[in-house]
Amino acid sequence: MLAIIGGTGLTKLANLSITRRQVVRTPYGDPSGALTFGEINGHDVVFLARHGYGHTLSPHEINYRANLWALAQQQLTGIVGVASVGGIRADLAPGKLIVPDQIIDYTWGRKHTYFEGVGKSVTHIDFTQPFSSSLREMILSASISLVDPVLDGGVYACTQGPRLETAAEIRRIENDGADMVGMSGMPEACLARELGVPYAILAVVANWAAGKNDSTQKIHLHAANEVVAIAMQKVHKILECMSGVCAV
Ligand code: HPA
């Protein structure tokens, strides 16, 4: 079964026929909400709204450990994290979809590992390739029928938020090698890896990042919300087409 973590603009799945909801308690506290089980296009999926079903949790307030733990208790083939981002790279205009292949973590103070605390042995997971290549491929092949192709590969920079970045911060992040900037990819990606669950991000470009193109003076958030709402129709199509089993 595929798990979908919905971000901004995706608090529920339009094409999901819901079979049940389940409140899951974890040793790490409560997830952002109940897990929603159902079917899309005949395939079992479980859905979780990352920011809560009423979109009340900021990226730094999300209990990522509880979310990932709750999902990993299910019989999962993988987790697709849908996340909105600001576009830094010249081809990442608002409305584009992209499946990143690398990530840089600028967050701080988030609970980002299961390997801590009394009695836990020191564990270093490999994170050279942070995303599941087979799950990435699945997303990309599910998107093949879209008129505007989903872009394959790019570096996702994860900032702390909830404020957006300064233009200088984006210049620095770009110099670091990032192509897009979001606030929720970490620690989601590394926790999934610690749990051994295949994970990939389907990123929706909501706006130009601070200082880029029409965001030179400010980021127009109202326009960004509209862009995301339209792009989510493409996301729904992609999720409809996805099925199968993948490896980490
Ligand atoms: N910065 C960080 N996160 C984001 C942005 C941005 O410009 N747009 C959507 N999520």
Image (spheres, rainbow, N blue to C red):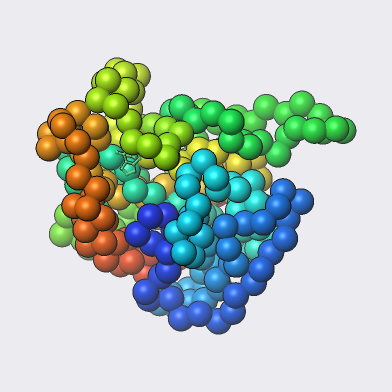
Give the camera-side residue of 78 and 56.
56
Residue 216 lies in quadrant: top left
Give the camera-side residue of 169 and 202.
169
Q: In this rendering, would 240 be left or right of 148?
A: right
Residue at horizontal 43%, vertical 76%? 16
Q: In this rendering, would 174 be left or right of 40?
A: left
Residue at horizontal 37%, vertical 74%? 14
Relative vertical location of residue 19 with respect to residue 203 in this rendering, above or below: below
Ligand 1: give its quadrant. top left
Relative vertical location of residue 82 with respect to residue 118 in this rendering, above or below: below
Residue 188 lies in quadrant: top right
Where is residue 120? Give x, y as percent.
Answer: 82, 33
Q: Is residue 174 visible?
A: no
Where is residue 68? Give x, y as percent.
Answer: 61, 51
Q: Quadrant of the C terminus?
A: top right
Q: Is residue 237 visible?
A: yes
Numbered circles on residues, count: 0
Give the camera-side residue of 184 and 164.
164
Where is residue 200? Give x, y as percent.
Answer: 45, 47
Residue at horizontal 55%, vertical 48%? 62
Where is residue 140? Give x, y as percent.
Answer: 33, 52
